Amino acid sequence: MSELYPFGLAEEQEDRASRLHQESVIFDGCFLPGNLENPEQTTEFVEGGITGGNVTVADVRHNFVQAMESVLKYRKIVRDQPERFMLGTTRLRVLEAKRLGRLAIVLGFQDAKPVEDNLEHLEAFYALGVRITQLTYNTQNFVGSGCIERHYGGLTLFGRDLVQEMNRLGIAIDLSHCSDETSTDAIEMSEKPVLFTHANARTVCPAYGRNKPDELIKALAAKGGVIGVIFRPNFVKRDSEHRPLPCTVEDVLDHVDHVVNLVGVDYVGYGSDVFSRLQIPGVRMSPWLLPFRQRRPDVFGRSEVWSTVKGLENGREFFNLTRGLVARGYSDEDIRKILGGNFLRALGAAWNEVKVPTVSVV
């Protein structure tokens, strides 16, 4: 059972939150790959009512061949557990997963490095079900600059071609770890909605690159995109020295409120970036992640151990997000949008399933 955060809801509000959580398509903008390999972890998400999400199956550590092997590995995990998983290659399949009580797995990359410098590689990944690709992960690549580079640039010439090819094929563009300059170029270049699958508002928590400034959130919304608020304390709440502060689901909801007040309710979701079996509070972070944090505490926060958001510490507690939205006065329709409807709408357009909608930004 999940631990109920003390919002002080009345009985009818609790009943409403429970109904909404059960009825809604709940989409997580950023699963981590270990979630599929750990039965206890996936059980958390199933019991937490999650419909599906974007699962990182390749990143900056993978070249083309290594990424192919990883994609095939995770396809096999999904194929071998049809009672639990199904590939989320279309909006309809995500909705079908909801009906069947399965987790819809959207295969995603956190860096375009696996494409190398060959756009034909992208088509091969698409054929195997990859539907989301982040352009850069922290550092410079063939496409553009990440959020920790010494110098920031926009899209390269190859990066512009990659954006066009992703639009043509129907692979959603993710800019979560990109520099502001690369993000700006990609949003302008793309004909389809783009995503910050797991990032927060820089106005609320000053994390360069990983949290997004208001002008970029406005540009994202103008293209019909979505920002998925992240549950990592480093990006939720900090002091003036970039040390993460103790935080709760209320602080995460402050980021949701900021985006809604800035551009409207149609452009925000959530991207938890949570793997509770790995991210144990007080345990040192993975060795391959530490150099990023040590070089740029202004980006990642001044911490080398994991911490969690009270009330959102594992998949079972995601119900508290729904309860918190009820507590803050959101309507049923708006809550459904934030929990997953907004991501499904944007992904449908990015995946060439539906016409790119005309959007209006507050």
Image (spheres, grey):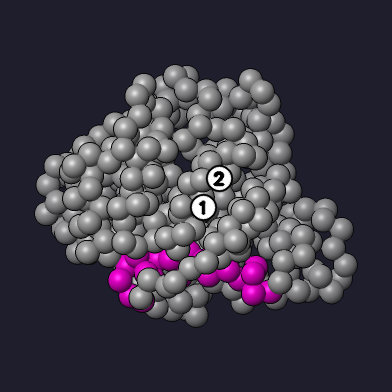
134 falls in the magenta region:
no
Residue range highlighted in magenta: 332-354
**Relative to 205, residue 291 above or below:** above
Say the numbered circle drawn on residue 214.
2
Look at the image and tell me in which quarter the C terminus lies.
Answer: bottom right
Say the numbered circle drawn on residue 38.
none
Look at the image and tell me in which quarter the N terminus lies.
Answer: bottom right
Mark 2 and mark 1: span between their CA atoms?
A: 6 Å
Count of numbered badges drawn on the protein:
2
Query: Residue at 18% of width from left, 43% of height from top?
Result: 158
Query: Residue at 11% of width from left, 54% of height from top?
Result: 120
Residue 252 location, x and y as percent? Answer: 66, 47
**Relative to 11, residue 237 above or below:** above
Q: Can residue 175 be seen?
A: yes
Q: Quadrant of residue 79?
A: bottom left
Query: Residue at 61% of width from left, 71% of height from top?
Result: 336
Q: Which residue corresponds to mark 1?
A: 218
